[in-house]
Amino acid sequence: MDLPRPELALVPRPRRLSTRAGRFRLDDTTRLRVTPGAGPAAALLRTLLAPATGLPLRAAADGAFVLALDPALTGLGDEGYGLTVSPQGVLLRAARPAGLLRGVQTVRQLLPYEALSGRPVRGVPWELPAVEITDVPRYAWRGSMLDVARHFQPVSYLRRYVDLMALHKLNVFHLHLTDDQGWRMPVATYPRLTEVGGARAESMAGPAGSDRFDGVPHGGSYTRAELRDLVAYAAGRGVSVLPEIGLPGHVRAALAAHPELSTDPGRRLGVWTHWGVCENVLGTDDHVLDFFRTVLDEVMDVFPAPYVHIGGDECPTVEWERSAAARARAAREGLPGPRALHPWFIARMSEHLVGAGRRPVVWAENGVTLPLDCTVMSWREPGHAHAAARRGHEVVHADHRATYFDYPRGPGPGEPPGQPGGIVDLRAVYDVDLTPPVPEDASRVLGAQGQLWTEFVTTGAHVEYLTYPRLCALAERVWDGTSGWRDFTSRLAGHRARLDALDVPHADPPAPVPTLHAPSFTPPTLPHPREPCRKDSR
Ligand code: ACM
């Protein structure tokens, strides 16, 4: 089949692009001129193009393809770049290394789409159209969250996930590492967290409240070496990894490993096999705070990025209300009651991170006021982001109605169980609105990210089936996103050839049951009745 040539159908669209006459051909004789500091970008270009093209792209002082890091360049910020392609040569310039990495992805998209294939391709001329591009992102935080707690994914898959993010110039990989149903983060001081908390006996079949279970054990955890490798791999693609350790709720897996962390240390709990919001939360004694300070120290040791996510969402307070120790703690701290232990707990963990030079990220929750040091990730209502920005917080939009890729895109049979009324189609993602009502708060809006919660997602192929092309729309909006829906969808039509070359599914529902490249993928069984995956009222 003759597919359309998507060479100028770039996603996300560059800020400024003009075409010139002619083309530049890359072949075995093409040499890279790599200025000091541009080595990582040259290495990435070679790595990305090698599987399909086999091009050696050796370095030479007189190379026609120049990668230049020039800190004196102005107006490009940390991630902007300039790219000039003429029949005689290529000049990719940036003021900072990350800008060059973004430009490499543009070069990759300008080549014939076959260049993205993981298999050798013969007979395609590796030509770039002559262009002049100046490109700068609009938002600094362009993220994608993957829940590896509900269903574990090996690091080999996470590397592919990072590569797909980088193709779309996304830069924050939010790794949801712990939850009620699984603890994936290795903690040397407390090995039971992964030994016990990393495995559950079975999983609920169907949404929260179902009385059916699949009888299939599920488990997995990472080693420190694996996570360090992932961090380095992502850094080589200009992506930082944001670890999330959820607290003081969503901790049932930790409680299964360490009953002494709970409000009722004598009780024995298993790793949760249900979906929904679990009422078991952390106790509030000093040893619990110290335990999690140690956990966060080990997290910071593995993940160097400035931000560390500490959850904060969906924290029922019934156990604190029942617990004499928690009530006494609230009184000692001068709090109005046990419910206030939620922001109090987060404040203690935030202080610890800030003291170590990091920046805590916390999900926005109804009625919970956070310390101003916390970056607020708003998921229920955009209004939470607006209010937090007004108070002076940095904010990241993760609005469930626009960015939750576990929500169905429509009625297709391969779609997951939905939230009530919760359809997130491509247009809803594209329409995500990051503009605060008070213009001076705009500088506190860092950006936005997509989320994939994986209660019903077990394979990498299924992750991608739900993520694409919705993540393309989000990437478009946070990079520039000013060209309009029609322009975006016409470019996306061309971009799909690249997704095909990468074996990334990108169907728009209603779709037939997808036949995907990974044999392990089976479409989820639709539960009935349609009920929320979690018990909250999003
Ligand atoms: C969330 O969906 N509980 C952040």
Image (cartoon, grey):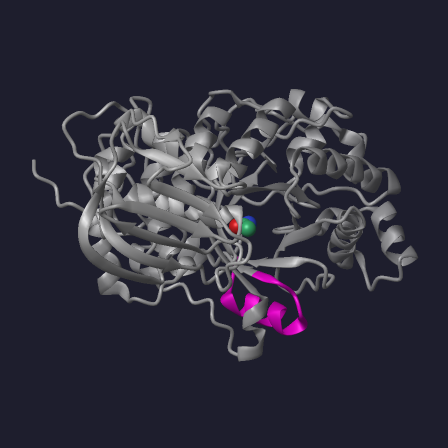
Compared to residue 270, the image places residue 127 above or below, namely below
Q: Quadrant of the N terminus?
A: top left
Looking at the image, residue 172 lies above or below residue 392:
above
Any part of residue 166 in sight: yes
Q: Left or right? Give the position of 134 relative to 231.
A: left
Residue positioned most to the left: 1
Asked if residue 463 lies left or right of residue 313, the reply is left
Residue found 74% across the figure and 42% down from its top:
282
Residue 11, how many percent across, how many down?
31, 52
| Coordinates of residue 358 in the picture (x, y in percent) | 72, 49
| Of 387 and 224, the residue lying toward us | 224
Q: Is residue 116 magenta?
A: no
Q: Nearer the viewer, residue 511 or 444?
A: 444
Q: Toward the viewer: 209 or 462?
A: 462
Seen in the image, is 130 located left or right of residue 307? Answer: left
Q: Residue most toward the right?
A: 332
Q: Is residue 441 above or below residue 123?
A: below
Part of the protein shown in magenta: 379-395
Q: For the image shown, how many numbered marks are present on the structure?
A: 0
Residue at the spot 12% in from the left edge and 41% down from the top edge? 3
Q: Which residue occupies the foreground of this view, 43 or 403?
A: 43
Query: Which percent across, then down, holds residue 111?
Result: 25, 41
Horizontal placement of 330 versus 82: left or right? right
Residue 149 vs 169, above or below: the answer is above
Q: Where's residue 240, x and y in %?
A: 55, 43
Q: Residue at x 71, y 32 (%)?
A: 255
Does residue 524 appear anywhere in the picture?
no
Residue 389 located within the stretch drawn in magenta: yes
